[in-house]
Amino acid sequence: MPDASTQAAPSAAPAPEEKLAYRLFTGPDDRAFCERVSAALAEGYVLHGSPAATFNGSSVIVAQAVVLPAAIASADAAVASAVDDLENEEFDGEGHA
């Protein structure tokens, strides 16, 4: 019978990687760029803002931000809560500019 100290420990399954709330894709304006953005949309991301484009002297470089809808809802709730907190505070006549 093998010694317990020499037996290999069972390997733990890697934890699923948490999706980032925000991603920014950049690169040449080509099919590969569009495929990367399309794949993110298929994973549940939504476009955030308009795409940006610039010319680097030889090709057009584009950028597109995407976010998870849950991240937007969470951020909106945090802002609403902060505004509620400010509205409920008493004003002492002093503030910050």
Image (cartoon, rainbow, N blue to C red):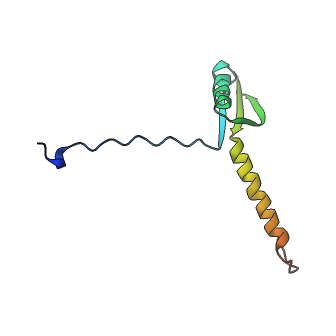
Instruction: Measuring from the top left, give residue 11's x and y in whole percent.
Output: 33, 41
Do we see residue 3 in this rendering?
A: yes
* Residue 97 visible somewhere in the drawing: no
The residue lying at 73 percent from left, 58 percent from top is 78
- Quarter of the view holding residue 58: top right
The quadrant of the picture occupied by the C terminus is bottom right
The picture places residue 84, in percent across and down from the top left corner, at 81, 65
Foreground of the two, 66 or 6: 6
Q: Which residue lies furthest to the bottom in this view?
A: 92
Residue at the extreme top: 31
Residue sitting farthest toward the front: 1
Give the residue at x 50% y 40%: 16
Residue 88 image point, x, y percent: 83, 72
Q: Which of 70 and 59 is in front in this view?
A: 70
User: What's the residue at 46%, 43% (across, down)?
Assistant: 15
Q: In this view, does 88 lie above or below 20?
A: below
Say above or below: 80 vs 1.
below
For image coordinates 77% across by 52% down, the residue present is 76
The answer to which quarter of the image holds residue 41 is top right
Q: Please state, as top left, top right, bottom left or bottom right, where the N terminus lies in the image.
A: top left
- Does residue 89 lie above or below 3 as drawn? below
Q: Position of residue 31 (x, y in %)?
A: 66, 18
Direction right: furthest residue: 93
Quadrant of res 8: top left
